[in-house]
Image (spheres, rainbow, N blue to C red):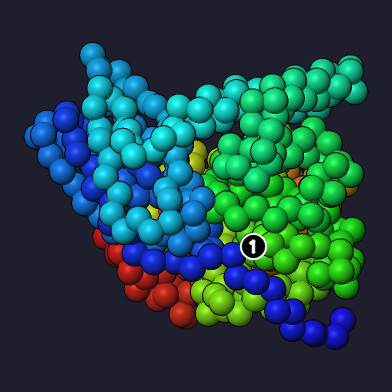
Amino acid sequence: MPITTHSYNEVSNYYPLEVAISFEETGVATLNYKGPLGSTAISFFNTEKPFNVITKTILSTSSQNQMFTVLSIKKTEGLFRFRFKVFFVDEGHSFLNLKFQNGELSFPDADESSNLDELIDAYFNLDLGAEILRLKNNKRGQEHSASLKRKLDSVYSKYSDMYPDKASRLGMVNDISYYSRLQIIEPLSPRVEAFIKKSNFSMILDDTFSGLFYGYVNNRISSFSFEQLNKTHYSDNSLYRIAQGIYQYLIQPENQINPQQEEALTWLRTTSFYQNYALEIEESLEKVKGKELTYFLKNLWVLDESFKGHLLEDVLKSNPSKYYLLDFWATWCAPCIQGFIDIKKMQLPKNLTLIHLSVDKYEVKDKWKSKTIEFGLNNSYLIDQVKNRAFFEIFQLEAIPRYMILDHQFNVVNINMFHPHEPQFLEYLNELTDLKE
């Protein structure tokens, strides 16, 4: 696809905002706000003296509709009490003064706070995410979906009557809350499509609403015509938000194998959103490449000797260690078998756990089990090749045996470790940082 640079409007500029919380008692408050590349949370801990003022500086926006979510935590009679509140901050504020009292955080200057809390609570209490999960296992799914839609429509209708001005803050919150949830029930809803294309709200939203454009991208990425993502079909504001949604999509490790990933990235690089934050975006995209393999390793589905399935993440958790040596092998591989023999002759570091992962096909599972018993392999598992196709696309296993080292946090320490017959094998293990006893 030819690259044409689109000149979309910047939604907002960012500037330092000083936030001070006056604590009337001990407690913890977390402020969540939308930065240029995603949501950011900053916490204020007042755990020692009851009367205290804590001040921190954040990066805020010059928009007149900057929205903040605050979480207050107070321990009462041994139990923790949590409270959420949402409020707007007007353009021009360089100092934000909040008050923590009776286990709650309040913003004295917020004149719409109570109405905003009521509106957001009404949508939050629908708990659509959990309801949709139940729907997937419900034989009467279509009927249940229609019921959820009626509940959502009822809330939207109520607050549309209360706040008929769509350009007002509460009118915008109502619209965005509704359409972000409608696409949970109807992922490809034409109404969501129409709303996205014409939307022109100036609101800078917190995580409560940022899912609208990410969800829109996530639901349609496989069918997007990127040549149609232009000002002929979308408002400038929508294109900027879609660019943010595509960025959020691309930095999810599980999305790296999507066939349209490259086309999405090419389009993203033509936008003003990318031009404004190119360095930060490229750094994030580079980081996700390292997380990509970690994600698929954690979710690797393996079978034990009873042919019961497990996630590799759970296997490692049940075998706590500082480091793990993953041995990828197969029953037909003579060098793999020799590797077992060589390793058994070694004294491996005590804080290293060996995990054997067979790439044999399921049809020869009995042969794999027999070899596991024959060579006395502990922690031996058979990789389910059907469920792990994405893993093999990411981790191109061109030859076996193949050895990999992970640490206890699932970080890949060495993706292509020496083989047991090589003198560097044991030397490398013993010289790993913190590996020596």
Is 288 in front, or is 81?
Answer: 81
From the image, tell me which residue sits under label 1.
244
Side of 433 relative to 314 (left or right): left
Image quadrant in which you'd find residue 224: bottom right
Residue drawn at (35%, 50%), measured in percent from left and top?
42
Locate the N terminus by quadrant.
Answer: bottom right
- Total labels drawn: 1
Residue drawn at (65%, 71%), measured in percent from left and top?
9
Side of 214 relative to 52 (left or right): right
Residue drawn at (38%, 26%), measured in percent from left and top?
82
Give the crowd class for mark 1: few <14, some 14-19, many >=20 residues within 10 Å: many
Residue drawn at (33%, 69%), measured in percent from left and top?
433
Q: Amino acid at mark 1?
A: Gln
Q: Residue furthest front?
A: 165
- The answer to whether any part of residue 341 appears in the image is no
Provide residue 167's location: percent of width, then percent of height. 65, 45
Disc 1, SS: helix
Provide residue 334's location: percent of width, then percent of height. 73, 68
Is 1 in front, or is 239?
Answer: 239
